[in-house]
Image (cartoon, grey):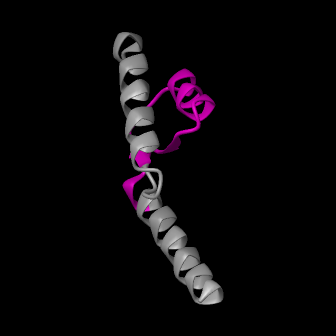
Amino acid sequence: MNPDTLGKRIEALQTITNRYQEIPLITVTLNNEASKNSFLHHGLVLSDDPTDAVYMLKALNFYRKYFNKKIK
């Protein structure tokens, strides 16, 4: 990943995450280890496999439904 654009991309994703805190954001992209660590260091969820990202969202949705039932 181009280090010149990495910071801008992370900043943009953090802006989106902060603006829409109730919506989970999972970034799917191929990265080298340094780039992956930069995403993780900034608190962003990262996957290099789209299928894994779908499973993550599916699991989050399961827990959302479970906890919504418990609260009501």
Q: Residue furthest top?
A: 4
Question: Can residue 55 be seen at all in this image of the molecule?
Answer: yes
Q: Position of residue 5 (x, y in %)?
A: 34, 16
Looking at the image, residue 16 sits to the left or right of residue 60; the answer is left
Q: Residue furthest right?
A: 70
- The magenta stretch spans which residues? 26-51
Tally of numbered tags? 0
Question: Can residue 28 be seen at all in this image of the molecule?
Answer: no
Q: Position of residue 7 (x, y in %)?
A: 43, 18
Looking at the image, residue 41 sits to the left or right of residue 35; the answer is right
Measured along the vertical axis of the image, is residue 54 above or below residue 26? below
Q: Quadrant of residue 69?
A: bottom right
Measured along the vertical axis of the image, is residue 40 above or below residue 34? below
Q: Is residue 13 magenta?
A: no
Q: Residue at x 49, y 26 (%)?
A: 32
Q: Residue furthest front?
A: 72
Q: Position of residue 40 (x, y in %)?
A: 59, 35
Q: Quadrant of residue 72?
A: bottom right
Measured along the vertical axis of the image, is residue 69 above or below residue 34? below
Of the 4 image quadrants, the one containing the N terminus is top left
Q: Residue at x 65, y 87 (%)?
A: 70
Q: Residue at x 51, y 63 (%)?
A: 56
Q: Is residue 46 magenta?
A: yes
Q: Position of residue 6 (x, y in %)?
A: 40, 20
Q: Residue at x 40, y 49 (%)?
A: 20
